[in-house]
Image: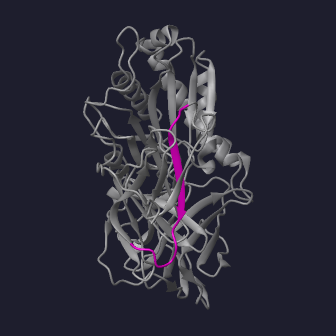
Amino acid sequence: MLFASIGVLTVFAGHAQNPSSSISAVETVPAVNQWLSPGDRLQVRLIAQPGVQASFLNGQPLVELTPAQAQGKFGVYQGTYVVQPGDTLNDRRIEVQVLTPDSVLEVGFSGNTVRFLNHNEPQLAVTRSDLAYLNYGLGEDRLGGAKLGYLDSLVVLHLTGRVGELYRVQLATGQHAWVPQNVVRLLPPGNFVPTSLTGSWSVQGDSLYDYVRVPLSARLPYRTQLLENPTRLVVDVFGATSNTNWITQRTGLQELGAVYYEQPQPDVFRLVLPLRHRQSWGYHLGYQGNTLVVQVSRPPAKLRLRGLLVAVDAGHGGTNVGATGASGAREKDLTLAIAQKLRQELEQAGARVVMTREADISAEISDRVTLLRQPRPALLVSIHVNSAGNTTVQGTSAFYRYVAFRPLAAALYKQMQGTGLAGWGLVGNFNFGLNGPTEYPNALVETAFVSNPADEQRLTNPAFQQQMAQAMTRGLKVFLKQTRAKGPKGWLLKQAALEDK
């Protein structure tokens, strides 16, 4: 045993309840409930009287840091234990033992629990809905963690860890992601880690879309990327290994080229789907039974606003007020006023418009995304106003998530600057819910800074709101014209000119 002399025993959890105790706090780092697998590190921090001897997990030493290591503080102790195969710990608080200089033994416990997972009893989960998503890591800000991608419902995930409200998912050998606890449902023990051989797949088109169908034996997780030069959709299916002996490409294809697959590692199956147009018009990925279905959108028949279905999103609304200016102007009111004017401009140009809200109502981001899945617009513009702590910051900006949709955001951004607003920036990889859909090109316009007095005055002016709506309409027209100009091989700019008439 580490301590030979035992005096008074003090037991507590988290922070000390006994003012005479030498222990102030015990915590894991991070200080949340955790699941750990062999090879993971359990990190423990103790705040106690300087000069004590301390340990955790029945003898693992806690080392006292110098003040230089502990931001000038005394009595900070830290220790690390690497979980070993066969270690057992079932949702227990971490015990810390402290022997004071006068030979008093004290015992403290962390406020959170730790479990060591048994790899012989895999913990599985399934996604709850078709809006479930994976994060790259544990980072978090007001927009949430950086998302690796979205998943369909009932996708089976192999969990190998937990930190707070996030589960670690093993996608493939050496590849992990994190999934929020609230988007999955834990499965009872006794299940096998999901794997699948791929069957031979079919590629075909109907009157609306091109399709790729890959049969699997389980709903496996996946990741998608739209890549450029050349334009192609790449889908990685984790846990899948090729048993594809042929790919049947039937008639009716309009957007997909000569598709093929790769096996970059034994448990990652990669679909490579070349696209015939340099501008992607989106795609949807999901399961029909255990068959993975990729639905690829085609360009509109005529690349002009007349007849095109455009979605307009007025940011915030209802209880979600958004930013507020010095004069009391509220983002939810400004975005709705601009969105209604944009709708008028688009309809005058012959477009059909679907609004995510038409009044001052509360509407969750997930509800807006779900709402747009039925009409399936060709384009989406989400309208917001910006805010900053520094009132001198001003200007307009546009945001996109996927590089394939950058041209839409760039066209809107350029036309918005034409109103006289300063250019604040074009922002990519934006982790916002309405930039998440892959089904259609989408962009978010931060019209101006309501926190800036000059910008706020512009934003509250109905005439300037109209100018911004006109600028966004021009931006959509420019995007469509540029898309025609860089269409597939064999298209003529003369045809584009004729369609403008």
User: Would residue 263 be found to the left or right of residue 286 on screen?
Assistant: right
Q: Position of residue 175 (x, y in %)?
A: 58, 67
Q: Is residue 77 magenta?
A: yes
Q: Position of residue 306 (x, y in %)?
A: 49, 41
Of 135 and 263, the residue lying toward us: 135
Query: Can see residue 248?
Result: yes
User: Would residue 406 be found to the left or right of residue 36 on screen?
Assistant: right
Identified at 46% across, 9% down, the residue is 457
User: Would residue 14 be found to the left or right of residue 420 on screen?
Assistant: left
As drawn, 201 above or below 433: below
Q: Position of residue 274 (x, y in %)?
A: 66, 67
Of 170 and 262, the residue lying toward us: 170
The residue range painted magenta reads 73-88
Q: Position of residue 339 (x, y in %)?
A: 40, 29
Of 305 and 457, the residue lying toward us: 457
As drawn, 16 above or below 189: above
Q: Quadrant of the C terminus?
A: top right
Q: Is residue 237 magenta?
A: no
Identified at 42% across, 51% down, the residue is 98
As drawn, 278 above or below 443: below
Q: Quadrant of residue 365?
A: top left
Q: Quadrant of residue 433?
A: top left
Q: Quadrant of the N terminus?
A: bottom left
User: Would residue 183 be found to the left or right of residue 269 on screen?
Assistant: left
Query: Can see residue 307?
Result: no
Identified at 45% across, 18% down, the residue is 465
